[in-house]
Image (tube, coloured by chain):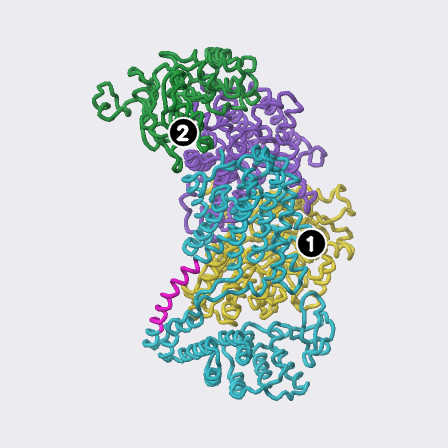
Chain colours: A green, B yellow, C cyan, D purple
C-alpha cells in the first residue's frame, strides 16, 4: 500500500509495536502482498516490478517458463533473497523484508523446495517432529519431550502423507515422490498460514499426483491455509487451479482462470516461441 | 629440584632400598647393562638428533668390543620421542620405569630437557645432556656435557671485541629460552664493557623462520654506521639455511659483518651451500677440523660406523663421547651401575676430550671445556682461528642475571644442592618462606 | 682492514711500472717464503704474505689464493708445501706448491693447514684486488675497484691516481675516485664530502657516518647534511625494497599454493600430502645436482621438468592408490592423504637421510643485481618471482585454452553431465591431480633455492598454502595469485615495526576477520567446492 | 523441574550408553585393583607408568568426544580444537605453577622461574587469581568457552561454512601457537609450563595422586560422554543433525541455526578445555606445541578412525591411535611413522565408517546398513 494510504489507514499499527509472533492480520483480505519488487543478479533482472496479491485461503498456481523468476520470488518471500526495490507484506502487519528466514517461518510461512529437501539422516518421524510448530529456542529444544498429543498429531500427518509404515526409516531411503510428500507433511506440521509449494509433483506417478492434488486442494480454504503452487505440469495445474498467474521475465504476464490464460495469445507466444536463452538462464 | 626437606629425606631412605631391589636375583650378573637413548628420530628435531643416537650406539659397540663394563654387556634401548615434548617425559618414564635402564643419553632442545627433568628426578635416573644450553639449571640427576653460556657465548664475544674490534652488535635469535637467556647475559656483559644501548640490536624470529629478507637488510643498515659490526646468532637449526642464503645474496660477507653462530656446526653446514659463507664464525668446544689423533680416530670410527665417506662429526657428538666415557669411568670407580653410587663417583672424574685436553666433571654437574672459534670454509668445515688458553669450567648460574647471581651449585655432600643461595644461605626456595606460601 | 705500509711500498712500485716482474725466483726462495707463512701468530703471517707479494714471484698469486681458501697446506713429516685440489672426505688430491704438479692423494691427517682469520683474509683480498686492477676483464676490474672502497690509504693514493688516468672504463674510474674520496674524507677534507654527495654505497655512508661524528664541526656539519640527503634517496629505496620483499614472499606462497588451488580448489580433494609433493620436487633438484656434479646451473634447468614429472607421478600414485576410493567423501581424503604425508616424510628420512641436503645455487642465480648503489635485488628471489608468474600463466593457459582445461571445468561443474557427454571423468581426475601435484613439484624446485631441503620442508608450507587458497576463494586461480602476493606484501610491510612473529599473527587474524566479511574468499565462485 | 532435567537422564536408558559406561567404569576399577593390590613383580601388575599413560589416553578420548560432537553431529569440521584443549591445559598449568610457590629454582614466592631469569619484576595481570584453585578451574571452562563464543559468534553469524570454517579454525589455533611461542606473552614461551609440584595439596609425583588423576579423568570422560549423548539424543541433537545435512531447510523450519551451532560449539570447546586440564598434570608439561595445527588434525583423525558421529567411536579411535603411537615409537622407532601413516590410509579407504561402523555391523548388520547418523551420505560432506 502506498505511503499516503498507510498514514490515512486508522487500523494501521506501526511495525515496531507488533511482536514478531503476533498472528497475521488478514482482515483486509490479502495474506500476501508483493509490490513493485525488483531484484537483479549481476545485471540480469530476475524479478522485474512484480506485483502479486494472494488472498487468505486462496489456492494460487504460478506458471511460467524457466527463468521467469518463480523460485526467486519464493526466495524473496521466505527471506532468503533481499530484493533491490519493492515491498513484501504478510497480511497487513508484517513487513517480510525486515525479517530473516526463521522469523518468517515462525510467522507461519512454510516452503517446499523445488528439489525435495528432507533430513536424510533422520527418520521420517523425526523429520516431522522437527517441523512441528513449537518453541524453537535452544533450551526448550534441548529439554523438549514427546507428549501424547504431539505424537498423535505426527501420526495423523503420517496417515495424510501415507508414510505411516515407513515412520521409523531414515528419510534418505525414501523414493523421490515419498520425499516430496514427506516435505509436504513437514509443511503441515508447521501449521503455516501460507504454503509456498515449488514443483510438488516433479517425478511423481499419476496416482501420486492425484493424491497430491487432493491434498493441496484440501488444505486451502478461508481461515485455513493459503497455498501458492509453482508447477510446470499443466495437467496438474489444471486439475487444481482456480486462479493462475503466468510469470514471464520476472513480472506478471497474465492472470486469471486456467482457460483464460491458456487462451491468452501472449502466454501462448511465450510458451511456444520461448527463446532458448531464456530457457538456459 | 627437591620440593621439601621432608621429601628429600624420604628419598634418601628410599635410595638404598632401591639399590637392594636392583641387586636381587631378578637381575643376575650376566644381564646386560641397559643404556637408554632418548633422541628424536622423527619430527622437526630428527635432523639434529638422529646422529646423536647413532653416536651412542657406536660408543656402546666399541665398549662391548673392549669387553663391556664390569664384565657385563652394554645394551642400547632406543625410543623415539618424535620431537614431541610431552612424549619426551613419557618415554623417559618408559625407559626408567619399564625398561629400568641404568643411564639415559638424550635430549636436544631445552623444552624437551625441561619436560624430562621432573621424571628423571622422581625416578632417580641419570641423564647425560649433550647440547650447549642456556644454563640456569643444575639437577641432581642430570649431567650437562654441553656448553653453558660462559663456555661458548662469552668467549666468542670476547674474541670479537678484542681480536676483531667489533663495536656494534646484532643479537639475532630464535624466540625460545636459550637465545633469550644467552642474549640477556650477553647484553649485560657487553654493557659492562660500556657498549651503548643504540649499539645493540636484538631480534627474535619464530622457529623455522624462512623469510629473512627484512631482517638481513635491517642488519645491513645497522652495519653501515661506520662502526665495526658483528652478528651474534643464536638462530636455531632449520632457520639457518635461509638466513645464510639471504646473507650471501644480499652481499654481506664476513669481512664486512661477521656472523658468529652458536647453533651452527658441521652437521648444519652439510645442508648449506657454504661458498658464500666463508669466513663467518662459529663458537664451539669442538670442531671436526681439530688436528689431534684422538679426533682423527673418532672420525675414522664414525665414518666406518656410518659407512659414509662424507659423514661429519660435531660438538654434541663429542659431548656424548665425553659423557659416555665419564659414565664408564664412574661406574668402574663405583663398581656398580647403581645410580646414587655413580652420581657420587662421577664428580671429579676426568677423561680425555677430542681436542687434545681433558674434561673433568665439576661438582655442579657441568664439565670443563676448551672454547674454540672457527671460521667457515668452503668445504663445510671450520678453520680454528682462536682458542681459550685453558679449559673453562661450566657455570650453572650466570653471574650476569639478577636472579641467579647469588646461586651456586654443588652436589657433593653435605651441601648436595643445585641452587644454594649464598646470600640467604639456604638451598633454593628458602625453607623459611615455605609456611607462608603453604597458607596463601 | 688496512693494508700495512710494507705492502704499500711494494704496491706503489708494482703499480707505477706494471710490467710483469722478473720471475727469477729459485724454488728455495719459494720454500723460504712459504716457510715464513707457516708462522705462529697471525701478525707474523701478515708480514709473510707481504713478503710473498713483494717477492714478485709469479706463483705468489696462486699461493695467496690457495691460502685464501685454506688450501695451502704443509705435510707434517716432510714439511713439503702442497696445494689441496679437493678438500672433501678423508684423502685429498694435492699438488706441490712449488712445482705445481699434482702428486696424488694425501690423508688430511698428515696435512697441516695454514689457517688465516678474517683480518688476513681482508688483507689478502685487497692485495689481490689491487693486482686485479690490471686484469683485462672490465667486470673483474670493477669488482676489484669496489672491493677497494674504504681500503684506500695514503700510500695507495698516488698509484691509484695513476691507474685512473689510464683506466678507460668510466665505472672503474668512478669507483676508484670514490675510494680516494673516502680516504680524503678520513683525512678530514671537506671537499671530499662534496664528491661523495648522493652516493648510496654502504661504505660511503659508513665513512660519512664516522665523519659526522668527527670533532671538526664544519666537516661533521657537511657530512651530516650529505647523509640527510642520502637518507632521503634511501627512503624511496627502502620502500621499493619492502615491496620487492613482499612480492618475493608472495611469489613463494603462490607457488606453494597454486598446485593446491587445482587439486583442492577444482577437485575438492583436501590433499594434506601437498607439502610432501613440494618436498619431492626439492629433492629432485638435489638429486639432479648429484647426477651432474659441477654443473648446478644445468641441473637446475633440467630439474624443472624432472621435478614436475616426479611429483606428478607421485600424484598419480596417490590418486590411484587412495583418492579414487574416496569419491564424494573429500573429507576422508584429508585423513588418508595425511597418512600419505607421514609415510612420504619418513620414507625420505630412511631412504635419503634425516639431515638436510645441500642444493648449490648456480652462480647466475646467486648474488644480486644492483638497481642503484643502495638498492639491489637478490637474484635467486627474482628468479623465483619470475618463475612463479610463468607457472601461473602456464596454468591459466592449460585451464582456459586446452581440451584438458575444458574437460576439467566441465567435470567440476557437473560430473554426471560431463560423463554423459562422453568425457572420461576418471581420466580427467587423474590428469587434474597429476597437474596439481606436478606444479607442487615445480614449487619444490624453486624452494630448494630459498630454504632447507629436508624431510620437514613440506610441513612448513602446507598450512600457508591452504590459507592462501581459501583466502583467495576456493577454485579460483586468480584468487590464489592475488591472495598470495597480497598476503606476502602485507606480511613484509608489517614485519619491520611488528616483528616477524607478530606480523605473521596479525596476518592470520586478518585472514580470519576477512573471511567473516567475505565467507567465500576474495573471489567467490560457484561450483562443487564452493557449495555449502 | 523434572521436565527440565529429564533430558540428562535420557542417555542412561540407552543400551549402548549403558554398555559404554559399564565397560569404562569396569576397566577403571580393574586398573586400580591391578595397580594397588598386586606387587610390583607380579606379571599382571599395572605399573604407575601404565596408569599415567592410560590417564593420558582418557583425556585424549574426552577431547575426541568433544570434536565428534561438533563434527559428527553439527557437521562443523574444526581443525582448531587443539586450541581449546591447550587453553584448558594452560589454565591448569598456571595454577600448578603458582602452587610451586617458592620451591622454584630461584625460590621466588610469586614469580615462576622463567619469569625470574627473563627478569620480569612483577606478575602480569592475567596471572592473577591462578593461585586459587576454584578460579583456575573456572578458567579451565571459561577461557576456551569465551574464545569459542566470540569466534563462533563471528563465524556462524556471517554463515562461514564448510572448508572456509575449517581453515579459519586452523588459522585460529596457528595464530595462538605463534602467540604463545612469544616469550613476551608471559606463558613461558617454547618451554611452556613444567616442573609442577602439587595439585590441591597432593604431591604430583606420588603414585596415589597419579592413580587419582587417572580415575578423575575416567570419571570426567564418563560424564562428558553422558552429556554429549544427552544433547545428541535430545531434540536439539536432531536439530543439529538437521543443520548438518540441510542448513537452509532447518532455517525455513524456524530454527535459528547459528545459535544452535554456537551453543554446541561452546559446549564442545569447554569439554576440550576440561580434557586439557586433566592432561597437563599427568604429562607434566604444557607448551605451545599443543596449539599446532597438525595436532588438531590428528584429533580429527582419531575421530574418523574410530567412526564419526558415534561418540564411542571417538573414544575408541583416540585410545587406539595413541596406544599404537606409544607401542610403535618404542618397538620400531625408525619406522613407526610408516605404520601410523599406513593405518590412517587403510582405515579411511577400507572402513569409511571407522571402527565403530565395523562394530555396529558386527552387532547389528541391518541397523548399521541404515545408521541414521551416518554422515558419509550427507550433502554437507562435499564441502566439509
Foreground residue, D96 or C165?
C165
Crowding at mark 1 (Cα within 10 Å: few <14, some 14-19, many 20+): some
Q: Which mark is residue A80?
A: 2
Circle 1: element type? helix
Q: Residue at x 54, y 51 (%)?
A: C394
Q: Residue at x 67, y 34 (%)?
A: D46
> B112 and D20: which one is in front?
D20
As drawn, B203 above or below D350: below
Residue toward you, C316 or B119: C316
Residue C249, given in percent of the width and then of the height, sits at 49, 54
Q: Is residue C66 visible?
A: yes
- The dominant secondary structure in magenta is helix
- Give the x, y percent position of residue B127: 63, 51
**In terms of image quadrants, where is residue B98?**
top right
Q: Would you say D248 lies left or right of C93 here?
A: left
Q: CA distance from mark 2 to mark 1?
A: 65 Å
Q: Nearer the viewer, residue C518 or B5?
A: C518
Q: Specify whether A91 is left or right of B389.
A: left
Residue corresponding to mark 1: B54
Is residue A97 found inside the magenta-colored segment of the image? Answer: no
Q: As displayed, is residue B97 above or below residue B313?
A: above
Judged from the image, the secondary structure of the residue bearing numbered disc 2 is loop
How many marks the image carries: the answer is 2
Q: Quadrant of residue A227?
A: top left
State yes or no: residue C241 in magenta.
yes
- Residue interval drawn in magenta: C223-242
Amino acid at each position: 500500500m502506498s505511503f499516503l494510504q498507510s498514514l490515512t489507514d486508522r487500523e494501521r499499527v506501526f511495525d515496531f509495536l507488533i511482536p514478531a509472533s503476533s498472528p497475521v492480520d488478514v482482515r483486509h483480505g490479502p495474506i500476501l502482498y508483493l509490490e513493485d519488487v525488483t531484484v537483479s543478479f549481476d545485471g540480469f533482472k530476475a524479478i522485474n516490478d512484480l506485483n502479486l496479491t494472494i488472498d487468505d485461503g486462496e489456492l494460487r498456481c504460478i506458471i511460467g517458463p524457466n527463468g521467469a523468476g518463480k523460485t526467486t520470488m519464493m526466495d524473496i518471500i521466505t527471506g532468503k533473497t533481499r530484493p533491490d526495490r519493492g515491498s513484501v507484506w504478510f497480511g497487513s502487519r508484517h513487513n517480510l523484508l525486515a525479517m530473516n528466514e526463521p522469523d518468517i517461518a515462525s510467522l507461519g510461512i512454510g516452503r517446499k523446495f523445488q528439489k525435495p529437501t528432507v533430513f536424510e539422516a533422520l527418520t521420517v518421524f523425526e523429520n516431522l517432529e522437527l517441523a512441528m510448530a513449537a518453541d524453537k529456542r535452544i533450551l526448550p529444544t534441548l529439554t523438549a519431550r514427546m507428549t501424547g498429543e504431539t505424537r498423535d498429531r505426527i501420526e495423523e500427518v503420517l496417515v495424510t502423507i501415507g508414510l505411516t509404515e515407513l515412520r521409523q526409516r531414515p528419510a534418505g531411503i525414501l523414493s523421490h515422490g515419498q520425499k516430496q510428500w514427506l516435505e509436504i507433511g513437514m509443511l503441515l506440521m508447521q501449521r503455516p498460514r501460507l504454503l509456498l509449494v515449488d514443483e510438488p509433483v516433479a517425478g511423481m506417478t499419476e496416482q501420486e499426483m492425484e493424491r497430491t492434488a487432493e491434498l493441496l486442494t484440501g488444505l486451502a480454504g478461508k481461515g485455513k491455509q493459503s497455498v501458492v503452487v509453482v508447477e510446470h505440469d499443466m495437467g496438474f495445474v489444471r486439475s487444481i487451479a482456480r486462479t493462475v498467474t503466468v510469470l514471464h521475465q520476472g513480472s506478471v504476464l497474465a492472470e486469471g482462470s486456467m482457460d483464460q490464460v491458456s487462451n491468452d495469445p501472449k502466454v501462448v507466444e511465450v510458451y511456444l516461441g520461448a527463446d532458448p536463452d531464456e530457457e538456459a538462464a | 629440584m627437591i620440593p621439601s626437606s621432608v621429601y628429600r629425606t624420604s628419598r634418601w631412605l628410599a635410595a638404598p632400598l632401591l639399590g637392594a631391589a636392583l641387586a636381587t636375583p631378578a637381575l643376575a650378573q650376566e644381564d646386560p647393562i641397559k643404556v637408554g637413548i632418548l633422541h628424536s628420530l622423527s619430527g622437526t628435531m630428527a635432523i639434529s638428533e638422529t646422529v646423536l643416537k647413532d653416536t651412542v650406539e657406536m660408543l656402546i659397540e666399541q665398549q662391548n668390543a673392549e669387553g663391556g663394563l664390569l664384565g657385563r654387556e652394554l645394551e642400547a634401548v632406543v625410543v623415539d620421542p618424535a620431537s614431541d615434548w610431552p612424549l619426551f617425559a613419557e618415554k623417559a618414564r618408559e625407559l626408567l620405569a619399564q625398561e629400568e635402564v641404568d643411564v639415559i643419553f638424550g635430549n636436544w632442545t631445552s623444552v624437551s630437557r625441561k619436560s624430562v627433568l621432573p621424571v628423571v628426578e622422581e625416578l632417580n635416573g641419570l641423564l647425560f645432556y649433550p647440547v650447549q644450553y642456556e644454563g640456569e639449571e643444575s639437577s641432581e640427576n642430570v649431567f650437562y656435557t654441553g656448553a653453558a653460556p660462559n663456555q661458548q657465548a662469552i668467549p666468542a664475544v670476547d674474541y670479537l671485541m678484542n681480536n676483531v674490534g667489533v663495536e656494534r652488535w646484532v643479537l639475532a635469535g630464535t624466540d625460545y629460552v636459550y637465545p633469550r637467556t644467552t642474549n640477556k647475559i650477553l647484553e649485560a656483559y657487553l654493557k659492562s664493557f660500556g657498549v651503548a644501548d643504540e649499539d645493540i640490536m636484538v631480534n627474535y624470529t619464530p622457529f623455522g623462520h624462512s623469510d629473512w629478507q627484512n631482517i638481513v637488510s635491517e642488519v645491513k643498515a645497522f652495519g653501515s654506521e661506520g662502526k665495526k659490526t658483528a652478528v651474534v646468532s643464536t638462530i636455531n637449526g632449520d632457520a639457518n639455511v635461509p638466513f645464510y642464503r639471504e646473507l650471501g645474496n644480499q652481499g654481506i660477507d664476513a669481512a664486512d659483518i661477521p656472523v658468529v653462530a652458536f647453533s651452527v656446526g658441521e652437521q648444519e653446514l652439510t645442508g648449506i651451500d657454504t661458498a658464500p659463507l666463508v669466513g663467518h664464525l662459529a663458537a664451539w668446544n669442538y670442531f671436526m677440523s681439530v688436528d689431534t689423533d684422538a679426533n682423527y680416530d673418532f672420525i675414522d670410527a664414525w665414518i666406518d660406523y656410518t659407512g659414509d665417506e662424507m659423514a661429519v662429526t660435531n660438538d654434541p657428538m663429542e659431548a656424548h663421547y665425553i659423557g659416555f666415557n665419564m659414565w664408564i669411568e664412574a661406574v668402574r670407580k663405583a663398581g656398580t651401575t647403581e645410580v646414587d653410587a655413580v652420581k657420587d663417583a662421577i664428580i671429579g672424574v676426568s677423561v680425555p676430550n677430542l681436542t687434545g685436553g681433558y674434561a673433568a666433571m665439576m661438582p655442579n654437574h657441568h664439565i670443563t671445556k676448551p672454547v674454540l672459534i672457527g671460521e667457515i670454509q668452503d668445504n663445510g668445515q671450520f678453520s680454528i682461528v682462536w682458542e681459550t688458553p685453558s679449559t673453562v669450567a661450566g657455570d650453572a648460574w650466570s653471574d650476569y642475571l639478577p636472579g641467579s647471581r647469588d646461586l651456586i651449585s654443588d652436589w657433593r655432600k653435605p651441601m648436595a644442592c643445585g641452587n644454594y643461595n649464598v646470600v640467604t644461605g639456604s638451598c633454593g626456595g628458602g625453607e623459611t618462606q615455605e609456611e607462608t606460601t603453604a597458607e596463601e | 682492514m688496512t693494508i700495512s705500509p710494507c705492502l704499500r711500498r711494494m704496491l706503489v712500485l708494482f703499480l707505477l711500472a706494471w710490467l710483469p716482474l722478473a720471475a727469477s725466483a729459485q724454488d728455495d726462495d719459494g720454500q723460504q717464503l712459504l716457510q715464513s707463512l707457516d708462522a705462529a701468530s697471525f701478525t707474523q703471517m701478515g708480514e709473510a704474505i707481504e713478503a710473498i707479494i713483494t717477492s714478485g714471484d709469479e706463483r705468489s698469486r696462486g699461493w695467496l689464493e690457495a691460502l685464501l681458501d685454506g688450501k695451502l697446506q704443509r705435510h707434517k713429516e716432510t714439511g713439503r708445501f702442497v696445494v689441496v685440489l679437493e678438500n672433501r672426505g678423508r684423502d685429498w688430491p694435492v699438488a706441490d706448491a712449488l712445482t705445481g704438479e699434482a702428486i696424488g692423494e694425501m690423508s688430511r691427517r698428515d696435512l697441516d693447514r695454514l689457517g688465516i682469520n678474517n683480518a688476513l683474509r681482508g688483507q689478502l683480498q685487497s692485495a689481490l684486488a689491487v693486482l686485479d686492477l690490471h686484469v683485462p676483464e672490465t667486470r673483474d676490474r670493477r669488482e676489484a675497484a669496489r672491493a677497494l672502497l674504504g681500503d684506500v690509504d695514503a700510500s695507495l693514493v698516488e698509484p691509484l691516481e695513476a691507474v685512473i688516468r689510464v683506466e678507460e672504463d668510466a665505472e672503474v674510474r668512478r669507483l676508484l675516485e670514490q675510494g680516494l674520496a673516502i680516504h680524503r674524507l678520513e683525512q678530514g677534507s671537506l671537499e671530499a664530502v662534496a664528491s661523495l654527495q648522493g652516493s648510496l654505497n654502504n661504505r660511503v655512508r659508513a665513512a660519512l657516518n664516522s665523519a659526522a661524528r668527527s670533532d671538526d664541526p664544519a666537516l661533521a656539519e657537511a657530512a651530516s647534511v650529505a647523509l640527510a640527503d642520502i637518507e632521503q634517496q634511501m627512503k624511496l629505496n627502502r620502500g621499493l625494497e619492502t615491496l620487492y620483499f613482499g612480492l618475493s614472499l608472495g611469489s613463494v606462497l603462490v607457488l606453494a599454493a597454486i598446485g593446491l588451488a587445482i587439486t583442492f580448489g577444482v577437485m575438492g580433494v583436501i590433499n594434506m600430502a601437498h607439502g610432501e609433493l613440494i618436498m619431492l620436487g626439492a629433492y629432485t633438484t638435489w638429486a639432479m645436482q648429484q647426477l651432474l656434479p659441477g654443473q648446478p646451473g644445468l641441473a637446475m634447468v633440467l630439474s624443472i621438468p624432472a621435478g614436475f614429472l616426479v611429483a606428478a607421478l607421485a600424484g598419480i600414485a596417490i590418486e590411484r592408490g587412495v583418492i579414487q576410493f574416496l569419491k564424494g567423501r573429500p573429507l576422508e581424503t584429508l585423513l588418508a592423504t595425511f597418512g600419505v604425508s607421514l609415510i612420504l616424510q619418513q620414507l625420505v628420512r630412511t631412504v635419503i637421510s634425516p639431515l638436510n641436503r645441500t642444493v648449490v645455487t648456480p652462480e647466475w642465480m646467486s648474488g644480486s643485481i644492483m638497481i642503484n648503489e643502495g638498492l639491489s635485488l637478490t637474484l635467486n628471489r627474482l628468479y623465483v618471482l619470475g618463475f612463479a608468474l610463468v607457472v601461473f600463466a602456464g596454468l591459466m593457459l592449460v585451464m582456459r585454452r586446452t581440451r584438458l582445461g575444458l574437460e576439467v571445468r566441465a567435470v567440476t561443474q557437473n560430473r554426471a553431465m560431463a560423463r554423459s557427454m562422453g568425457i572420461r571423468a576418471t581420466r580427467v581426475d587423474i590428469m587434474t591431480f597429476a597437474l596439481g601435484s606436478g606444479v607442487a613439484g615445480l614449487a619444490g624446485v624453486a624452494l630448494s633455492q630459498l630454504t632447507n631441503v629436508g624431510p620437514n620442508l613440506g610441513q612448513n608450507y602446507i598450512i600457508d598454502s591452504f590459507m592462501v587458497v581459501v583466502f583467495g576463494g576456493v577454485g579460483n586461480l586468480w584468487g590464489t595469485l592475488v591472495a598470495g602476493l597480497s598476503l606476502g606484501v602485507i606480511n613484509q610491510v608489517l614485519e619491520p615495526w611488528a616483528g616477524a612473529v607478530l606480523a605473521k599473527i596479525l596476518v592470520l587474524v586478518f585472514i580470519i576477520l576477512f573471511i567473516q566479511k567475505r565467507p567465500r574468499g576474495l573471489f567467490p565462485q560457484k561450483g562443487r567446492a564452493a557449495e555449502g | 523441574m523434572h521436565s527440565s532435567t529429564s533430558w540428562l537422564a535420557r542417555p542412561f536408558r540407552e543400551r549402548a550408553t549403558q554398555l559404554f559406561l559399564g565397560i569404562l567404569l569396569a576397566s577403571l576399577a580393574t586398573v586400580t585393583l591391578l595397580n594397588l593390590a598386586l606387587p610390583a613383580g607380579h606379571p599382571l601388575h599395572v605399573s604407575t607408568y601404565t596408569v599415567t599413560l592410560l590417564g593420558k589416553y582418557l583425556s585424549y578420548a574426552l577431547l575426541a568426544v568433544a570434536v565428534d560432537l561438533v563434527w559428527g553431529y553439527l557437521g562443523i569440521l574444526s581443525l582448531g580444537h587443539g586450541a581449546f584443549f591447550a587453553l584448558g591445559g594452560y589454565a591448569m598449568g598456571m595454577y600448578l605453577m603458582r602452587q610451586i610457590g617458592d620451591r622454584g629454582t630461584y625460590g621466588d614466592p610469586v614469580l615462576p622461574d622463567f619469569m625470574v631469569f627473563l627478569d620480569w619484576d612483577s606478575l602480569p595481570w592475567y596471572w592473577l587469581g591462578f593461585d586459587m584453585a576454584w578460579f583456575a578451574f573456572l578458567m579451565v571452562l571459561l577461557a576456551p568457552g569465551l574464545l569459542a563464543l566470540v569466534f563462533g559468534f563471528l563465524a556462524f553469524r556471517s554463515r562461514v561454512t564448510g572448508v572456509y570454517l575449517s581453515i579459519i579454525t586452523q588459522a585460529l589455533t596457528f595464530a595462538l601457537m605463534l602467540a604463545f611461542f612469544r616469550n613476551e606473552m608471559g606463558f613461558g614461551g617454547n618451554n611452556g609450563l613444567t616442573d609442577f609440584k602439587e595439585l590441591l595439596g597432593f604431591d604430583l609425583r606420588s603414585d596415589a595422586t597419579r592413580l587419582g588423576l587417572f580415575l578423575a579423568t575416567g570419571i570426567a570422560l564418563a560424564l562428558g560422554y553422558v552429556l554429549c549423548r544427552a544433547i545428541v539424543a535430545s531434540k536439539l541433537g536432531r536439530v543439529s543433525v538437521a543443520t548438518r545435512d540441510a542448513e537452509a531447510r532447518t532455517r525455513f523450519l524456524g530454527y535459528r541455526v547459528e545459535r544452535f551451532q554456537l551453543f554446541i560449539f561452546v559446549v564442545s570447546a569447554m569439554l576440550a578445555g576440561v580434557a586439557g586440564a586433566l592432561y597437563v598434570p599427568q604429562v607434566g608439561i604444557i607448551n605451545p606445541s599443543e596449539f599446532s595445527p597438525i595436532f588438531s588434525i590428528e584429533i580429527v583423525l582419531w575421530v574418523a578412525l574410530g567412526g564419526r558421529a558415534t561418540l564411542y567411536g571417538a573414544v575408541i579411535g583416540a585410545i587406539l591411535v595413541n596406544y599404537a603411537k606409544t607401542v610403535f615409537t618404542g618397538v620400531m622407532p625408525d619406522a613407526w611413522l610408516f605404520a601410523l601413516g599406513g593405518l590412517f590410509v587403510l582405515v579411511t579407504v577400507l572402513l569409511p565408517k571407522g571402527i565403530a561402523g565395523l562394530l555396529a555391523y558386527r552387532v547389528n548388520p541391518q541397523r548399521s546398513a541404515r545408521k541414521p547418523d551416518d554422515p558419509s551420505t550427507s550433502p554437507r560432506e562435499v564441502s566439509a
